[in-house]
Structure formats: structure tokens, C-alpha cells
Image: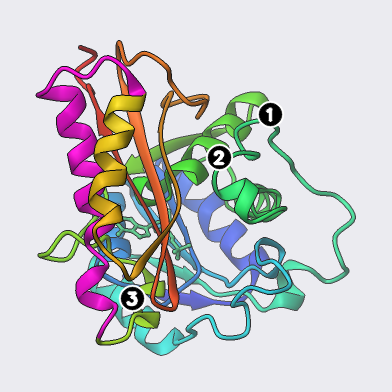
Amino acid sequence: MAMIVTTSAAHVRDIAEKARRRGEKVGLHPTMGALHGGHAANITTMSRQCGLSIVTVFVNPLQFGPDEDFDAYPRRLDADIAVAQDAGADVVFAPSQLEMYPDPPLAKVAVAKVSERWEGEHRPGHFDGVATVVAKLFAIAGPCWAYFGEKDYQQLVVVRRMVTDLSLPVVIVGCPTVREADGLALSSRNQYLDEQARPAAPVLYWALLAGKRAIEEEGARNADQARRAMLDVIGKQPLAQLDYAAIVDPSTLEPLGAVQGPARLLIAAQVGSARLIDNVGANEDGS
Ligand code: AMP
């Protein structure tokens, strides 16, 4: 089947409905475009697991703050269509702003607590914007399997919680972070890194690995000790300005005191003109 590219929500709803009637699993991968190898890997996973794979490309104004990069955010739909097709998508849904928000929305979805810390503190209202647009995409696609990257770990937690709390007919599938050879997590915002900042950018991942090692190999049972290992690494890179480094409960995102079971290590830093985020899990076997 040739890939369908559409700007119409009604068209997507109809295609998804027909697929479900044929007994197919419908997959959905929401993105803001500027697709890279991380998105491609997620799309390929989805297309192996689902009969119909829908990729959405929409730069959602609701999730950008007034001083953020909404206008500058890279937009290249033709290239995105090619990436989605190569990765195995069946449908690309690229709505206009008017299609998604014919009127300024009065209703919104807010997921308390898990939206408030970390990225939420730095970007007030961001996760309300994410939850609202994702809820709309779920309403358009109908019952589906929705693929989200672990790269944006807090977003994954927020969306999972929204689905649970609102009983939405969606299964959330988390996809592992795809990295460059030097460890930098792929991100559409990496293109803001200049020649000087690019080699410094993997320091976020190195800091995460130092924290993970402290927990898993050096037996740090105290989160502060592991956090110090992260700070030591990031502190050695003068181009990186740390925003936060934290060791948190994987589902509540509350900071841990003692590390007794699974933990998530989160980090955010400004490197040159790019603000980067990354994370890894520790003790994932439940130890
Ligand atoms: P974005 O277009 O940046 O909003 O991302 C769309 C989806 O792709 C989100 O679920 C992201 O978490 C996911 N994603 C972004 N970067 C990566 C990556 N490096 N590896 C895997 N998934 C990613």
C-alpha cells in the first residue's frame, strides 16, 4: 500500500477505523517533525508491531513558552515524509494549526505532580500543552498503540499517567533512546549545537553513566552519592551549564533518598546555544 499523506483529521479517523474493522492493530507515533534516526527507529518498531502505522508531524504551539523556539523549530515536511516512508509508516498526518485548533482551545488536559518538576519547572505549561495535543491525537486516531521515546522520559511518564487516569483506550509503548556514536542522544535540537559545542554535548550522557555506575557497580545506596558522581563529570565541561541532575522514582519522578530498587537518572543542561535533556535507568532488573 502506498503511504498516505494527509492534513485531515477526519481522513485519519476514517483510515484508523477501517483498519480496526479489519482486525488490525493501529499504531501512532506523535512527532514534531525534523525526523531523525530516533524517530525512524520508533516508526520501524511500530510498523513491525502494528497493521497500520500512523506518524503525526505537528509543531504544537501549546507546548512552547513565549520565549522558546516555536518559530525557529525546524520544519521540513518533504524530508520527513521520506524518512517516515523508509521506516515503514503507512500514514503521515501533518495537520495545519487551523485543523488542530480551529478556535483557541478552552479545554486542556493537565496532569498534576509528574508535570510539575524538572522540565515542568523550567518550562511552565509545557506538559499541559503536550498532554492536550496528545489527547487530541488519541481522540482522532481512536483506540491504538502509541509509541513514545524514553529520550523525553518525563513526557512518557506524563502521557502514561494521563492514559491511566482518564481510562483512554491507548497502550503506551516506550522506545529506547537512539544515540550518536559518541553517546549524544539524537534530537531535532542538536542542530543548534555549533562546532565548538557539539564535541562537548555527550557530557550529559557521560554524567548519567557515572551516576548509573555509582549505583549499580559501586553500590551507592544513597542518591546523593550517585548525584555527586554526575555533578563531578558535568562540572569538568566548561561549555555545559547544568540545569538539573536528579535521581528519581521512575513513575512518580520524585527525588529518591535511598536507592533500593529501580531508579531513573535525569539531566538537563545548556551546552552552547542548545538546551539538552537526557536520562537513563538504573537497577532496571529490579535489584
Ligand atoms: P519530538 O519530535 O522531538 O517531539 O519527538 C517525537 C517522539 O520521538 C517522542 O516520543 C520522543 O521521545 C521521540 N524521540 C526523540 N528523540 C529520540 C531518540 N533519540 N531516540 C528515540 N526516540 C526519540
The answer to the question of whether label 3 and label 2 lie on touching residues, with beta carbons closer than 8 A, is no
Q: Which residues are magenta?
A: 196-223
Kindly identify the residue that appears in the image at 39 percent across and 77 percent down. 272
Give the camera-side residue of 262 and 43. Answer: 262
The answer to the question of whether label 2 and label 1 lie on touching residues, with beta carbons closer than 8 A, is no
- For marks 3 and 2, give the CA distance: 31 Å
Q: Which residue is mark 3?
A: 2
* Horizontal and vertical percent position of residue 68: 63, 73
- Residue 66 vs 128, above or below: the answer is below
Give the camera-side residue of 203 and 178. Answer: 203
Q: Which residue is mark 2?
A: 159
Please say whether residue 212 is visible from this viewpoint. yes
Q: Nearer the viewer, mark 2 or mark 1?
A: 2
Please say whether residue 88 is visible from this viewpoint. no
Compare marks 2 and 1 and give the one earlier in the sequence.
2
Q: Main secondary structure of the magenta part?
A: helix
* Horizontal and vertical percent position of residue 250: 41, 27
Three-letter amino acid code at the position of disc 3? Ala
Kindly identify the residue that appears in the image at 66 percent across and 30 percent down. 113
Q: Which residue is mark 1?
A: 166
Quadrant of the picture in which ligand 1 is shown = bottom left
Q: Is residue 53 left or right of residue 124?
A: left
Q: Residues within 10 Å of mark 2 (few under 14, many from 20)?
A: many
Three-letter amino acid code at the position of disc 2? Val
- For marks 2 and 1, give the CA distance: 11 Å
- Residue 134 vs 9, above or below: the answer is above
Q: Residues within 10 Å of mark 3 (few under 14, many from 20)?
A: few
Q: Secondary structure at mark 3?
A: loop
Compare marks 3 and 1 and give the one earlier in the sequence.
3
- Residue 232 vs 169, above or below: the answer is below
The answer to the question of whether label 3 and label 1 lie on touching residues, with beta carbons closer than 8 A, is no
Q: Secondary structure at mark 1?
A: loop
